[in-house]
């Protein structure tokens, strides 16, 4: 994983810098998200992995699939990745790009897992509290997990706040067993 990140980081930074300079962060986000999806497609991944396929063929096939989704700069980016045999790292490039974009926009995506569905009011109050704590704009996505019994688990980047009953019971059991 770390090796994949090391390979993807310079491409993500270059794409971000270009997008930032051209005021097209959202466009590049869409293009990279689309490209990552194509690269993860099983059939296309097999095509990319075929040693008989040239870099130019890979790039042209990729561009043909995404002709409506990739602008000229995006197509050139795909050609560059193909020529350097890096199309397979597109999902990681997209992920790193989104992290850079979130830092620039002072925003963070927060995943909230709760035992029961959050009401709109609860989600709004949680977003406001997290906005004050993290000093960033917050985008919340929530999901239910009945196994938590009660409480919530909040994930914001590499920050994890576990205030679920299940988590507290696990900590208690760990304390009792030590």
Image (cartoon, rainbow, N blue to C red):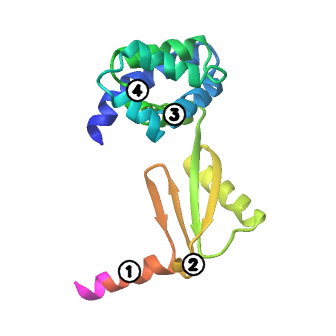
In the figure, is residue 168 to the left or right of 113?
A: left
Circle on res. 87: 4
Based on the picture, tell me whether residue 177 belongs to the magenta stretch: yes
**Residue 29 higher or lower than 166, as above or below:** above
Q: Which residue is mark 1?
A: 170
Choose the circle earlier in sequence order: 2 or 4.
Answer: 4
**Quadrant in which the N terminus appears:** top left
Q: Which residue is mark 2?
A: 146
Look at the numbered disc 4 and give the secondary structure of its residue.
Answer: helix
Look at the numbered disc 3 and give the secondary structure of its residue.
Answer: helix
Q: Nearer the viewer, residue 120 or 132?
A: 120
Which residue range is magenta in the image? 174-178
Label 2 – label 4 distance at C-alpha? 39 Å
Choose the circle earlier in sequence order: 3 or 4.
Answer: 3
Choose the circle earlier in sequence order: 1 or 3.
Answer: 3
Task: For the residues labelled 2 and 4, say whether their Cβ atoms are less than 8 Å apart.
Answer: no
Residue 121, image x, y percentages: 77, 64
Q: Residue at x 64, y 54 (%)?
A: 140
Choose the circle earlier in sequence order: 2 or 1.
Answer: 2
In the figure, is residue 38 to the left or right of 67?
A: left
């Amino acid at each position: 994983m770390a090796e994949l990140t090391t390979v993807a980081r310079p491409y993500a930074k270059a794409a971000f810098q270009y997008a930032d300079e051209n005021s097209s962060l959202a466009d590049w986000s869409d293009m990279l998200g689309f490209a990552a999806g194509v690269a993860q497609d099983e059939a296309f991944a097999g095509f990319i992995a075929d040693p008989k396929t040239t870099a130019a063929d890979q790039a042209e096939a990729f561009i043909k699939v995404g002709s409506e989704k990739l602008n000229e700069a995006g197509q050139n980016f795909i050609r560059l990745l193909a020529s350097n045999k890096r199309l397979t790292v597109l999902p990681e490039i997209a992920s790193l790009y989104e992290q850079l974009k979130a830092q620039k926009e002072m925003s963070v995506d927060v995943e909230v897992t709760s035992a029961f569905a959050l009401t709109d009011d609860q989600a709004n109050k949680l977003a406001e509290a997290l906005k004050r704590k993290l000093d960033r704009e917050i985008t919340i996505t929530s999901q239910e997990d009945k196994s938590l019994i009660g409480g919530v688990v909040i994930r914001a980047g590499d920050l994890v706040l576990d205030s679920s009953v299940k988590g507290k019971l696990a900590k208690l059991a760990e304390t009792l067993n030590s």
